[in-house]
Image (cartoon, rainbow, N blue to C red):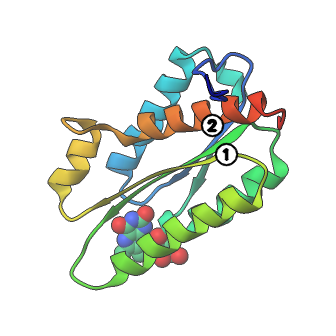
């Protein structure tokens, strides 16, 4: 049998930073609520969660890097909602958010989850922030939780 190292989904005693963009807050707030609900239902204490708000998804990597460097947390969860407009602005912000969050994950010693939804329509945003396509904030929180426990299993926490 191969040796398998993996993280479980117990959040008891784990600390998390949720870094959330305010732009499109009607949806972004639902992602934050989904992430908090998931973490607390898996055993995290309210006191072990810290929420950082930033203006938009472009700022997520900057705020996540600060959170990873300065907060005593086991993982960082980045949440944002991008909705395509009539100019290429969306593409620039989406690319920067994805690349930047990936860079923070590689450069810090912490797991950093990507909970940024990129939607062509308002309907897609509705679907992904707590209706028929689930809640991408909750999914990002689960990914962060598993990764935090994986890092712990590897002796890196
Ligand atoms: C400017 C902008 C636009 C047009 N659209 C979005 C969006 O759909 N989602 C989002 O999170 N942020 C958006 N922003 C704001 C930028 O992310 C950023 O906050 C500003 O360009 C200031 O740096």
> Is residue 30 rendered to the left or right of residue 108?
left
Of the four image quadrants, the one with ligand 1 is bottom left
Please give the name of the residue rendered at 55% of the width and 25% of the height, measured from the top-left corner.
39
Residue, far front: 1
Say few, some or many: other residues with alpha carbon within 10 Å of mark 1 (under 14 / 14 to 19 / 20 or more).
many
Can you give x and y, in whole percent of width and height, for residue 66 in the image? 75, 58
Task: Kindly report the distance in space between the C-alpha atoms of the residues bearing marks 2 and 1.
Answer: 6 Å
Q: Which residue is drawn at 79% across and 50% down?
A: 109
Q: Quadrant of residue 1?
A: top right
Instruction: Please determine whether, in this image, residue 120 is positioned above or below residue 111.
Output: below
Residue at (57, 21) in percent of width and height: 9
The residue identified by callout 2 is: 147
Density class for disc 2 (Cα within 10 Å; few <14, some 14-19, many ≥20) is many
Report whether residue 56 is seen.
Answer: no
Q: Name the residue under label 1.
A: 111
* Callout 2–callout 1 Cβ contact below 8 Å: yes
> SS class of the residue under badge 2?
helix
Q: In which quarter of the image is residue 108?
A: bottom right
Q: Residue 126's x, y, as percent?
A: 22, 46
Q: Is mark 2 within 8 Å of ligand 1?
A: no
Compared with 24, 148 (above or below) is above
Residue 75 as seen in the image, left or right of residue 54:
right
**Most foreground residue, 9 or 14:** 9
């Amino acid at each position: 049998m191969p040796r398998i190292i993996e993280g479980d989904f117990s959040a008891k005693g784990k600390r998390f930073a949720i870094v959330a963009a305010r732009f499109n807050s009607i949806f972004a707030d639902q992602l934050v609520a989904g992430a908090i609900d998931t973490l607390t239902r898996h055993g995290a204490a309210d006191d072990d969660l810290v929420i950082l708000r930033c203006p938009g998804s472009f700022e997520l990597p900057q705020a996540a890097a600060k959170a990873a460097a300065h907060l005593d947390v086991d993982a960082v969860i980045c949440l944002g909602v991008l909705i395509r407009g009539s100019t290429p602005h969306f593409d620039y912000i989406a690319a920067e958010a994805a690349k930047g969050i990936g860079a923070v994950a590689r450069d810090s010693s912490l797991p950093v989850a990507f909970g940024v939804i990129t939607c062509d329509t308002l309907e897609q945003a509705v679907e992904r922030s707590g209706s028929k396509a689930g809640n991408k904030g909750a999914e990002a929180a689960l990914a962060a939780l598993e990764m935090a426990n994986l890092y712990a299993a590897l002796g890196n926490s």
